[in-house]
Image (spheres, grey):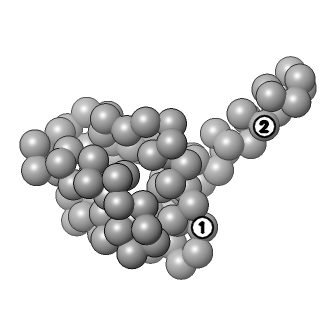
Amino acid sequence: MRIAGIRISPEYARLLVEILARDGFDGTAARLAQAIDLQVITEAPLTAGDYGAVRAALQGDCPAGLRRLRTELDKDQRLRRGFAGGVG
């Protein structure tokens, strides 16, 4: 599956579900778990809030297989702040 355009292996997607649940992002964890169960191979059906939850959950101890996702979400967040601030 893909999250924020980044290909995530099923093993790391399941690990992300565990991390999200551990950190209290139960709704996001449930949506991602459902996408895994449905064997979604395209972009995971996540909301903007879900992307924020994933970003927050990966800010601490981020597993190597999820670092590219964290980097992409951080980059996206910086771009959003720039647009919101009128930079462009």
Which of pointers 2 and 1 lies earlier in the amino acid sequence?
Answer: 1
Q: Which mark is residue 21?
A: none
Q: Residue placed at 52% from the left, 65% from the top?
A: 58
74 versus 47 height, above or below: below
Give the quadrant of the C terminus: top right
Q: Is residue 54 left or right of residue 17?
A: right
Q: Residue placed at 12% from the left, 44% from the top?
A: 39
Label 2: which secondary element: helix
- Answer with the quarter of the image where residue 84 lies: top right
67 versus 82 height, above or below: below
Give the quadrant of the N terminus: top left
Q: Which residue is mark 2?
A: 81
- Answer with the quarter of the image where residue 79 lies: top right
Q: Is residue 61 left or right of residue 66?
A: right
Q: Residue furthest bottom?
A: 61
35 versus 67 height, above or below: above
Residue type at the position of mark 2: Arg
Gap in Å between the C-alphas at discs 2 and 1?
Answer: 18 Å
Q: Residue placed at 34% from the left, 53% from the top?
A: 27
Q: Which residue is mark 1?
A: 59
